[in-house]
Every structure is written in structure tokens, then in C-alpha cells.
Image (cartoon, helix red, strand yellow):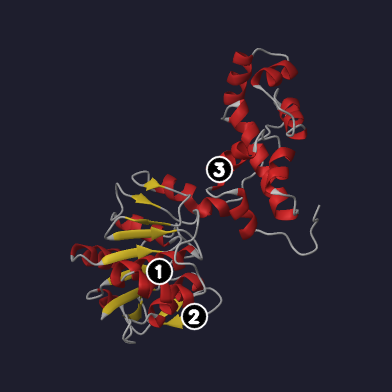
């Protein structure tokens, strides 16, 4: 039987800890036998889990003969890694143990050096911190999980479910994984990555800058068919100067800023109205439905219709 060791560190996120325990303990093979033996391991007998404390039945020795180790996220991802935990994970890796992280658990793996030079992910809200703390990683904030073979990392919260189901499929095939997915009330494969859950903030409007009046005007006129020449004319400068000023003050180009503003407004309309996708695209200034879909998917990772299904408006929202 495949043994999964779940490593409980201080400040462990309960959801991340519970996800692999629930998914793997409920997995059954076609003949009804359990697919996994799950053990919870910790450096010390009692673990601080925030709202409560837990007692782990296994110490770090429980990692030694495990087939897979899961490292859940913690509320303090920048906390120093315990030397004993780091040594235990590196020793397990040296013996070929598969190691996977959930959410900010990626920070723990990164601190061991096991992810050096590899592509990795974490919760989108912590991706910038991970990249800054570990420039030796190729951090991808848009995907739900990354499989490097022996080492896997996943995004936050529910992405841990996606990762666990992926591991089950690797171990026992799609049929067993599909049954586990049904028990978790999850699709075996979710469309799109975590980019669809990232709040696409309004593009930056530098306060007091020379571009502030233009950016405000652009946001108020998203529905218009605006060209670079239109923007330069409204700003009273040449297109070359406008592009240079945009780079200096916003870090992007005028048209990229405009497209992001349109996508952000489209997200708002998809979440709060029942307007057709075609109407939403026209309202935010995309000239055709195809263009709208292309720009929306490039930014969020999913189509407008898929985004609406994930973030559908409440019953009381407008149905115009």
C-alpha cells in the first residue's frame, strides 16, 4: 500500500492539512481496498494550528519510509525552516521519495534547496514573495499545480485537491482518480489555472502624474474604439512620447493598460449582471466577440463564459 506522510508544521493551515488526509484516506481501488495509508508527522508532539492545537501520532521518523510526503501551507511562510525538518526532507528526497507542497508549503520546499532551478507555484497572493525570496525558482503564479516528477507544488486552498487527485491518477490511473474526485465533489480536471481567481486590479493610475487625466479619461471611455493616435491626441503629445511616458509612469504600454482596464470591467459585469457575453464585450470596448474572448482568456486563463459560471451573479442581480 502506498504510504502518504503529511507533515504538520507550526502555524499549519488546517484546510491544507485536512485536504490530503481526507482525499487519500477515502481513495479506494477497484476491488475495494484502500489505496493509501496516511500518517500525520511533526517535529514535536503538539503542533500550533492557529485556532487549535493538534497532536501528531508520528514524529519526523515517519517520513523515512513514506512513498509520498505532503507539505501543507503555513500562516508564516517566511518563518525560518527548522534544521531538523530540512534535513528530514532532504534525506527523504535523496532516497527518491516523492514530495509535494500545498499553498505556501512551497516556501518550505524552496528553503530546503530541493526546488532549485525548477518551475514551481504557490498561492497567487504569495507568488511575488516566493520569487523574491528564492530567485533560483521559476515561479508560475497562474497554474493550479506544477509536476516536476519527484517534486510537485500547488496553489492555494482548493488547488490542493487538484494536486491530490493528480497524484492519485499518477499512482492508480484515471478511473480511481475519477472516483476520488466524485467523493470530493470535484471535477478531475478544472478548466483554467488560478489566474481566474486572481483579482485583476484596476491598472495603476499614478496620482499627480502627467498621465493621470488621460488614464481617468480612458477608464471613462472604455467602450469607445480608441487607438494609440486617439490617446496621443487627447494627451496632446506624440505617440512616441506617449509610449515613453506610459513606460515610465505605469510600467506598461498604452494599449496594454487599456486592454487590462477593459478586462477588469468585463469581470465586474460578468460577476454582477446577466448581460450576454457578447454585450459585455461590446460594453467594455472590444470590437468583436472573438477579440473579447482572446484578450479575456489571455489575462484570466479562462473564457468569459467559464468565468461567469465560476462567479455567477446572485439571483437578485440585473438580468438586463
Nearer the camera: disc 3 or disc 2: 3
Between discs 1 and 3, the one toward the N terminus: 1
Q: Which mark is residue 299?
A: 3
Please give the residue where the numbered disc 1 appears in the rendered image. Answer: 165
Residue 79 visible (yes or no)? yes
Which image quadrant for residue 45? bottom left
- Say if 155 sits above or below 250 in the image: below
Left or right: where 183 falls relative to 97: right
* Foreground of the two, 89 or 161: 161
Residue at x-position 55% and y-position 44%: 297
* Foreground of the two, 166 or 158: 166
Label 3 near label 1: C-beta < 8 Å?
Answer: no
Residue 28 horizontal/vertical position (percent): 36, 82
Between discs 2 and 1, the one toward the N terminus: 2
Residue at x-position 51% and y-position 66%: 158
Residue at x-position 59% and y-position 20%: 243
**Mark pair 2, 1: CA separation:** 28 Å
Label 1 near label 2: C-beta < 8 Å?
Answer: no
Residue 181 horizontal/vertical position (percent): 45, 73
Q: Which mark is residue 53?
A: 2
**Mark pair 1, 3: CA separation:** 26 Å
Q: Secondary structure at mark 2?
A: strand
Q: Residues within 10 Å of mark 3 (few under 14, many from 20)?
A: some
Amino acid at each position: 500500500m502506498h504510504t502518504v506522510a503529511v507533515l504538520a508544521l507550526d502555524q499549519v493551515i488546517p484546510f491544507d492539512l485536512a485536504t490530503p488526509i481526507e482525499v487519500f484516506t477515502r481513495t479506494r481501488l477497484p476491488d475495494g481496498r484502500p489505496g493509501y495509508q496516511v500518517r500525520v508527522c511533526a517535529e514535536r508532539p503538539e503542533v500550533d494550528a492557529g485556532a487549535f492545537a493538534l497532536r501528531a501520532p508520528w514524529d519526523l521518523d515517519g517520513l523515512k519510509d513514506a512513498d509520498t510526503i505532503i507539505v501543507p501551507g503555513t500562516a508564516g511562510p517566511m518563518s525560518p525552516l527548522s534544521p531538523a525538518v530540512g534535513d528530514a526532507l532532504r534525506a527523504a528526497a535523496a532516497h527518491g521519495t516523492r514530495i509535494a507542497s500545498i499553498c505556501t508549503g512551497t516556501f518550505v520546499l524552496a528553503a530546503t534547496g530541493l526546488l532549485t532551478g525548477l518551475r514551481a507555484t504557490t498561492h497567487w497572493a504569495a507568488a511575488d514573495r516566493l520569487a523574491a525570496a528564492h530567485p533560483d525558482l521559476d515561479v508560475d503564479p497562474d497554474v493550479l499545480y506544477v509536476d516536476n516528477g519527484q517534486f510537485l507544488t500547488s496553489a492555494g486552498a482548493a488547488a490542493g485537491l487538484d494536486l491530490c487527485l493528480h497524484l492519485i491518477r499518477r499512482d492508480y490511473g484515471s478511473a480511481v482518480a475519477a472516483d476520488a474526485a466524485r467523493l470530493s465533489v470535484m471535477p478531475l480536471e478544472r478548466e483554467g489555472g488560478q489566474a481566474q481567481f486572481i483579482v485583476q486590479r484596476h491598472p495603476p493610475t499614478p496620482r499627480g502624474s502627467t498621465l493621470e487625466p488621460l488614464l481617468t479619461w480612458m477608464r471613462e471611455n472604455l467602450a469607445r474604439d480608441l487607438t494609440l493616435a486617439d490617446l496621443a491626441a487627447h494627451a496632446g503629445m506624440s505617440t512616441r512620447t506617449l509610449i515613453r511616458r506610459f513606460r515610465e509612469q505605469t510600467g506598461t504600454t498604452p494599449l496594454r493598460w487599456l486592454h487590462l482596464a477593459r478586462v477588469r470591467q468585463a469581470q465586474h459585469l460578468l460577476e454582477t449582471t446577466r448581460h450576454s457575453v457578447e454585450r459585455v464585450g461590446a460594453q467594455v470596448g472590444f470590437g468583436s466577440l472573438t477579440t473579447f474572448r482572446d484578450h479575456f482568456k489571455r489575462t484570466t486563463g479562462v473564457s468569459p463564459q467559464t468565468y461567469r459560471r465560476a462567479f455567477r451573479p446572485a439571483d437578485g442581480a440585473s438580468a438586463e
